[in-house]
Amino acid sequence: MRDVAVVSFAYSNVARDASHNETEMIVPVLHEAVAQSGIAHDEIGFVCSGSLDYLQGGPFAFVAGLDAVGAWPPVRESHVEMDAAWALYEAWVAIQTGEVDSALVYGFGKSSPGDLHEIMALQLDPYYVLPQWPSMVDMAALQACAFLDADGATEKDLAEVAARSQRNAQENPNALRKGNVSADDVLKQPVTHHPLRDADIFPITDGSAAVVIAAGDLARKVSKRPAWIRGIEHRIEGHGLGVRDLTQSESTRAAGAAAGVANGKVDVAELHAQFSHEELILAEALGLDATKTSINPSGGPLAANAVMSAGLVRIGEVARRITNGAADRGVAHATSGPCLQHNLVCVLEGE
Amino acid sequence: MTDVFTAQHVIEYPGGYTRSVGPVIGRFLTGLRDGRILAVRLADGRVLVPPTEYDPATSAAVAADGDHWVEVGPRGTVQSFTWVSQPRKGKHSLDKPFAFALIRPDGADTAMLHVVDCGSADAIRVGSRVAPKWRAERTGSITDIEAWLPLGDGEEPEPAALHVPADDEQPVTGITVPIRLEYTLTAGIATTRYLKGLGEGKIIGGRSPSSDDVYAASRGTDPKSGEATSVEVEVRDTGVITTFCVVNVPGLSELAPEIPYVSAQILLDGANNTFFGLIRGVAVDDVHMGQRVKAHWADELKPDHTSIQWFEPTGEPDADYEIYKDYL
């Protein structure tokens, strides 16, 4: 295995970007990440992006992202119709092949132009589930209900997660929902999607993120403290909701074990928990102890969740804390599919 | 910039999106049409509903026929639920608030997602007993069950109205699902400026900060370098045909003229990218690469693509190949 590290990271979130088209939204973030990386734009070996055409409602909408990359002379490029955390996985594999030493990874998406919660129904079983149009939030709420019923956790536990997210987010300029709120404040809100409140549900976010990763000596040359990827794994479960055990996340547990989460202390964890209960399920699956690990210090997806880049942001947020010395070792998680169906775990470490 | 253009956009599959369901799902859906909930017993003894073509644990194939097919329900138990206070018109089968629930039919080991019509969120809990309310007219769809209704102790489920098959009725082989998504798209700063230019009889592009190249009708970047184009530049409405296509297919768009007609890429004077346009005012056979053309503007200019109706030859001598060879 080649040593690969995150050497730069940039991202931007707003509630609704009504001024810019997707290309214009990506440009500043992408160029900031490249500039920070210390690697010349035309020396980056591979470009990989993650986005979702249904967010723009047009086939091959992702191609517009290339106008922000600059693709002349032609570049090695790929795209995943998934969160860009999976684009980073592909880029990591590309570096492992030895063909390239660096990669630019970016993700983007505007959730505001359409009805995101409804659009996400299109990823569901088309025979038994899609014809009934459960929304993304309905699906999550079914998992939350099953989890609370089985685990003994309460709505107060969910509110604690939501409130801490908003408190942590106060120091994050890219967070949308933030404030010095308590769990009791959250519990005063009405339940909108039993058993969830608005504070338990991520805010609609438009945004983009970009990361540059580099191998061995190149990473050491351009970064004072590269955030080394010690393990990166992803696992998926079947799609049949009634077949899965929704009260826990076996795929996260398996990915975390394979990535080596337990092989050292975890100073920081950024979890792609788009709903409060998901953080509790994920922390359990990864064996995280909230008294020893700072979970979602950025505020996490409950503070801002630009679909298709929010998973990559988790990796960037952990990498940044390693590079600036705030943490030595951390875990980033990204998810895809309904009710935590598909999970990626990345272990990052400083030297 | 507050006056960026937006546009309403709809994705819709007219008549619905049609899918073949295959023999396993088809048998389940045929069962629903008959007013029965069918399931399959897997190798480990578990009863799976709704059935899939494979064992979810081992991925072994599930046969479409055999005595592993069993009937489950109609009573069931709610495993998990959420409340939908605002039904979505044209999507949800009920037009009043309802619950989505994972329901395990009696005799099954798995749950199915469905709708519970119970009046209020307080009338359902994990463990609630429910039974299907069947539609009278059933087509072989998951929505042949209109909803599940709460079932009191000792209460009998309402039986499905008898399905009377037509003489030539076949097992269910397909479903059609209406899909409609609505968007409000943002043109962005560069595209809005370009569109406004069209309304003023101008073609507006942007200049690349590093190469001085000008890109007309761009998304706000130099697509070669990815840099934002920062300066607005008007390019001319004359140019050179770089390549073209004679269209012999009718009805490609509302704006398309009668066939045969020519669509072309045009290198506008002052631009470093090509521009799409129709070519008219010349016999189809006389259109050629290097031909000089000029935009024909509509009498009424609007900030959209209808302002340039077509391009037509200027009669100037053809451009040298050298001028447009890098734009092919």
Image: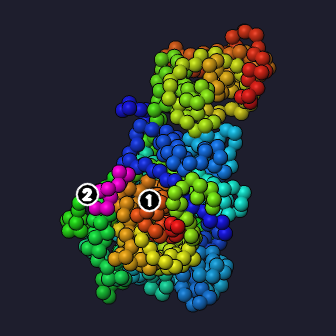
Counting from the top left corner in percent of width and height, residue B319 is at 75, 16
Please tell me how crowded label 1 is: few (under 14), some (14-19), or many (20+) other residues with Cα within 10 Å: some
Which stretch appears magenta? A167-175
Please tell me how crowded label 2 is: few (under 14), some (14-19), or many (20+) other residues with Cα within 10 Å: some
Residue type at the position of mark 2? Gly
Counting from the top left corner in percent of width and height, residue A216 is at 63, 61
Query: What residue is pinned by disc 2?
Result: A179
Front-most of B47 and A337? Answer: A337
Seen at 51% across and 60% down, the residue is: A225
Quadrant where the C terminus of chain B sits is: top right
Disc 2 or 1, which lies upstream in sequence?
2
Counting from the top left corner in percent of width and height, residue B240 is at 70, 19
Seen at 43% across and 41% down, the residue is: B184
Q: Which mark is residue B115?
A: none
Q: What is the quadrant of residue B65 in the picture?
A: bottom right
Q: Which mark is residue A324?
A: 1
Seen at 52% across and 62% down, the residue is: A227
Q: Is residue B177 visible?
A: no
Label 2: chain letter: A
Based on the picture, tell me whether residue B273 belongs to the magenta stretch: no
Count of labels in the image: 2
Label 1: chain letter: A
Front-most of A43 and B104? Answer: A43
